[in-house]
Amino acid sequence: MERYIIDGSRVLSGEVRISGAKNAALPIAAAALLTEGAVIYNCPDLSDIRVCIDILTSLGCKCDYRSNVLSIEPYGISCCKITKELCARMRSSVTFLGALMGKCQRAELYCPGGCALGERPIDIHLEALADMGAEITCEENGIICKGALRGADITLRYPSVGATENIILAAVKAKGTTILRNCAREPEICALADFLNMAGARISGAGSPVITVEGVERLHRCEYTVPGDRIEAGTYMCAAAITGGELFIRGVDGAVMGAVTEAMQATGCVIKESRSLIYIDAPKRPAAIDRIVTEPYPGFPTDMQAQFTSVLSKAEGMSVIEERVFEQRNKHIPELNKMGADISCTGGRYFEINGVCRLKGSVLRAYDLRGGAALAVAALGAEGRSVIYDNGFIRRGYERFAEKLSDIGAEISCEEINEA
């Protein structure tokens, strides 16, 4: 086990380079199963990526990963089953459902793990696959999908990112045309479609509410560069905002930041952006925001809620955040209150944040990926020393987190401890 030690109240300044998007790299790696081989550039070195490689290897793929380049050779696929242990280690293991159905016309896996954010059912995924002709059996948390898939006209009852990805992966080699309505519009969906189209798929409409996939017989070898991680970029924007800092954030397209940029500007930050750079100059103390509501893209991302909660805990005035995506994305609230924040939580989803002048360092525990990042953001803006345990959650989604923060002026170290 590791812990972060952060001495706060340092003004962050300088330049930080954003890594490839975790939420794009993972489904793209799963999609490589459907190709004749793939090389994925700018693939972030994260614990979730390592689990993904373990899954690919367990299925029979040959993988080589070094210097943020992941090569995948899927010729040796010898099984279509992912073990319970591997599924438990990563939520995105569910994406292999669609990829394996497209590759083998059979998939066996278990209900996925990941961060404990409340109910995250995969029934939307399964209903859509059933519409495409899959025969599905569920028993003791295990799922078996089998059958030759055919194109279908599918309307999702919620624009689930995972379900959208799974259906795209299942449809690229299915017989006929699949039309997917009310689908997710996140930039990571566009990245997946771009990768598959480069390999010979026929996907149109990614980034809109309706995606059309015309099935093809084969996908050839291809190379692809993962775009920058908008959530990582937003987290560093929050780090600048809470410390009154000034940062140049490179490697991410400002056009995908949308609602995050608007919220940052509402706190008083000056922001300039281009296709590969975001500049942020924060005031000494952020202003409160009347209301933030998390929604599917292009709305305010749930993956930025916790980090913004940290920023607004030091804002001048009262702010309100309503979490509409995950009913249990609130475990960071008691930890922030340990630091002197004044946050009330109603119904698990509605936060009233009365900004305070100072946060104080404390001993904290991360309970999920973005909540852990939020605690680090708060610690950067707090007086004194904070210690954050269970930082393995943070390493699931942030490459070289401590090193990047140190490079822009943070006093942060990572210390290994004995679990006993």
Image (cartoon, rainbow, N blue to C red):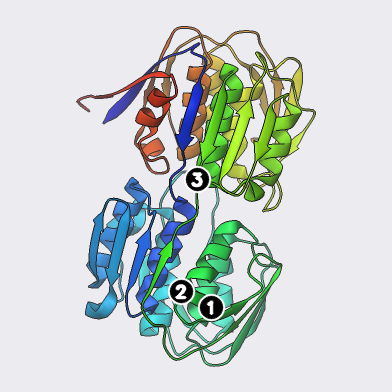
Query: Which residue was labeled with disc 3?
Result: 251
Residue 112 location (% of width, % of height): 41, 57
Q: Quadrant of residue 69?
A: bottom left
For discs 1 and 3, the disc positioned in front in the rendered view: 3
Q: Residues within 10 Å of mark 2 (few under 14, many from 20)?
A: many
Question: Which amino acid is tagged 2?
Answer: Gly
42 in relation to 356, above or below? below
Q: Nearer the viewer, residue 333 or 348?
A: 333
Which quarter of the figure is the C terminus placed in?
top left
- Mark 3 residue element: loop
- Mark 1 residue element: helix
Q: Residue at x 28, y 28 (%)?
A: 2
Q: Residues within 10 Å of mark 3 (few under 14, many from 20)?
A: many
- Mark 2 residue element: helix
Label of residue 129 in the image: 1
Q: CA distance from mark 2 to mark 1?
A: 8 Å
Question: Which amino acid is tagged 3?
Answer: Gly
Question: Which amino acid is tagged 1?
Answer: Leu
Q: Are marks 2 and 1 in contact (CB under 8 Å)?
A: yes
Q: Residue at x 76, y 29 (%)?
A: 266
Can residue 349 be seen here? The reply is no
Q: CA distance from mark 1 to mark 3?
A: 36 Å
Residue 310 location (% of width, % of height): 59, 24
267 in relation to 223, above or below? above
Earlier sequence position, callout 2 versus callout 1 = 2
Query: Which residue was labeled with disc 2?
Result: 98
Q: Residues within 10 Å of mark 1 (few under 14, many from 20)?
A: many
